[in-house]
Image: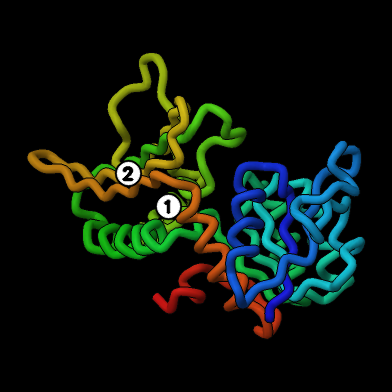
Amino acid sequence: MVKVGVTGAAGRMGSLIAKLVLEDENLKLVGVTEKEDSHLIGKEFIEGVKFYPSIKDFPEKPDVVIDFTVPQATLDLLEDAKDLGIALVIGTTGFSDEERKKIVETSKVVPIVFSPNMSLGVNLLFKLVAEVAEVLKDKGYDIEIFEIHHRFKKDAPSGTAVKLAEIIAEKLGKNLDDIAVYGRKGIVGERKPDELGVLSARMGDVVGDHTVFFATLGERLELTHRATSRETFARGAIVAAKWVVGKEPGLYTMFDVLGI
């Protein structure tokens, strides 16, 4: 039986993940967290499982904690995970480069699965985009990424779009900061050959759409993933949580979890 903690369980993803943990006979939910000043602290998420301000307050030490919150909450969690010596599954997005470095440093002490998107389909998209970018490199194709999310999403571009951009830049042998263009306005001139457009839209209740365009004169290739339910991400996180327990310290991705 794997003991699991879930952070931010009053949120959309946190509550969904916690409920899926409860449904899994091989998992035990030992506690959930919310902000220290939340009115939920001390109250029950479900009978026998309460909200706590920190994973250190859980009545039982978890084997793994699943985190889909905000960067600052995740950074605080890193310190607690190191102190307790427990594994992490991190699906939070919006980190700065310096904050990512802290995740890397923590992974030298405890095992961490860190991915901006934990669905099987999106991780296959990562793999396919890498292969296409490799084949079409230096062949005159313009590459653009377009993502759509719900009106409540706080960061842009999405973590998945950033990951796609990083994969493409690596395959092109470029520094992402040198080629990325985040939106366009005004008289910007002709598109530069090595530009990588990363465009975001926010509307309604869209769970998450990502399309990568490879276009040249006369043809266009589009690779698209559309998520219709957050459950696909949550179930991926559950798979990652089961996989990471007992692993050596290190920074793992969903490629490791899924064996692709």
Q: Is residue 146 above or below residue 84?
A: above
Q: Is residue 205 left or right of residue 238?
A: left
- Residue at figure coordinates x 75%, y 75% from the top left: 63
What crowding class fits label 1: few (fewer than 14 Cα within 10 Å), some (14-19), or many (20 or more)? Answer: many
Quadrant showing the N terminus: bottom right
Marker disc for residue 164: 1
Q: Nearer the viewer, residue 228 or 95?
A: 228
Residue on which disc 2 sits: 211
- Name the outermost residue toward the front: 47
- Residue at figure coordinates x 65%, y 84% from the top left: 247
Disc 1 to disc 2, how far (Cα)?
10 Å
Q: Is residue 4 above or below residue 249?
A: above
Q: Nearer the viewer, residue 194 or 208?
A: 208
Tell me where residue 15 appears, x and y as whole percent. Answer: 65, 49
Q: Quadrant of residue 191?
A: top left
The amino acid at mark 1 is: Leu
Tell me where residue 241 appears, x and y as whole percent. Answer: 62, 71
- Residue at figure coordinates x 61%, y 42% from the top left: 12
- What is the secondary structure assignment of the residue under circle 2? strand
- What is the secondary structure assignment of the residue under circle 1? helix
What crowding class fits label 2: few (fewer than 14 Cα within 10 Å), some (14-19), or many (20 or more)? Answer: some
The amino acid at mark 2 is: Thr
- Residue at figure coordinates x 78%, y 56% from the top left: 47
Chain-order first, disc 1 or disc 2: 1
Tell me where residue 249 appears, x and y as whole percent. Answer: 70, 80
| Res 158 seen here | yes
Q: Quadrant of residue 259?
A: bottom left
Q: Is residue 174 above or below residue 124?
A: above
